[in-house]
Amino acid sequence: MFNLKKKAYKNFDYTLFFTMLLLCAYGLLMIMSATLSHETMSNVKTQGIATILGLVVIAILVLLDYEFLGKLYIPIYVICNLLLVAVLIFGIGEDQWGARSWLKIGPVRFQPAEFVKIGLIISLAKFIDNHKDSINEPFILLKILGFAFFPVVLILMQPDAGTAMVFIFFIAAMLFIAGVKWRYIGYAISLGLLSLPVLWFKLDQYQKDRIFNFIDPERDLPNSGYQAMQGRVAIGSGKIFGRGLFQGVYTQFNYIPEKQTDYIFAVIVEELGFMGGFGLIILYFILLNRFIAISRKSKDLFGSLMIIGFAAMFLFHIWENIGMTIGLMPITGIPLPFMSYGGTFQLSNMICIGIVLSISVHREELTF
């Protein structure tokens, strides 16, 4: 379980670790700016506590041999599904956010799906690893798909289409890297296209409005299109170097809805300009590049697939959040890793980093 040798420390990926620290610090600074008008530091304190707790978890995970997680993949999978079932029964948030996605235990409120992402990536990576030699046999592939998509169905029942999209993306990435044949990928794409009309009629009106507003940004500016418009105007006003930290007009006068969560990128670019946004994207690029490098050096398929799952999850969050903020993607309520406010989200992101670092330090010395 804990068998880290002294020589393994030379494999510790300091670039990944310090990039994560920079992102955490950057995020805390921007959350402070986004909530400055609230005259309370509660959001910053919550994010700070989650970050400190995340560092403790990372230290434990680095010492832990990640193969131990593989041995527990069935209990992890069962617990993940039980959490999602609990959300359907006891969950809150439908009136405020349109989805029953949160659980509240005493004073603590958290979103189980954030931890389920990690649990499913671990479980699915081990399940695929167990069937790696027969993954393209139809019966085995159907077993894997059933295993992977059962939690997705539970999330769609909340309903939380945005989070379900994240799951589908990293599941597809893991299956692709595992070597699923192209003909099966073609079948999946065809099935997805054929199901679009059915999915359209299942969408709530606010979800349809988001798609209509993406196609025609000026369709309903005073109502359903207000958030997207304000975000784009704030970003445009930042120009190259921004209005200055804590000086954003749209940020400090609360013209941007959800500015500390979904629309934190608009805060960044209004106050720090194109350079602030570009700097953030560079940090994300370094982070994902280290993920891929560690994945390629992993000593087994299990470790490699876990990293690919985490990388795909981060990539989808980054692409969708920044894309929806600048008008290149429909609004889905997907937060930005290490930047958006949310204790559960921050902790889950840092757990992912801890597992990747564990894979890094426990890999064999010669893996090329």
Image (tube, rainbow, N blue to C red):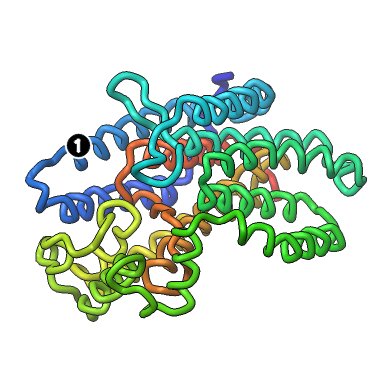
Residue pointed to by mark 1: 45
As displayed, is residue 262 above or below residue 240?
A: above
Residue 177 location (% of width, % of height): 73, 53
Give the vertical position of 94 relative to 66 (above or below). Answer: below
Q: Is residue 335 above or below residue 120?
A: below
Q: Is residue 69 above or below residue 205?
A: above
Q: Write the residue at 31% across / 34% down.
A: 50
Amino acid carrying mark 1 in the image: Lys
Left or right of 221 on screen, residue 308: right
Quarter of the picture containing the N terminus is top right
Please state the total of marks drawn on the protein image.
Answer: 1
Residue depicted at x 32% and y 25%: 108
Left or right for 190, reference 77 = right
Counting from the top left corner in percent of width and height, residue 145 is at: 77, 43
Q: Can the viewer see residue 286 in this picture?
A: no
Dividing the picture into quadrants, the one containing residue 198 is bottom right
Q: Residue at x 11, y 52 (%)?
A: 36
Report crowding for label 1: few under 14, some 14 to 19, many 20 or more residues within 10 A (C-alpha).
some
State the residue in front, 172 or 310: 172
Q: Quadrant of residue 75?
A: top right
Mark 1: which secondary structure? helix
Q: Is residue 286 left or right of residue 79?
A: left
Residue 197 in view (yes/no):
yes
Residue at far left of view: 39
- Which residue is located at x 74 percent, y 36 percent? 147
Pick the residue in front: 47 or 39.
Answer: 39
Q: Position of residue 200 (x, y in %)?
A: 61, 61
- Residue 290 drawn at (x, y percent): 51, 54
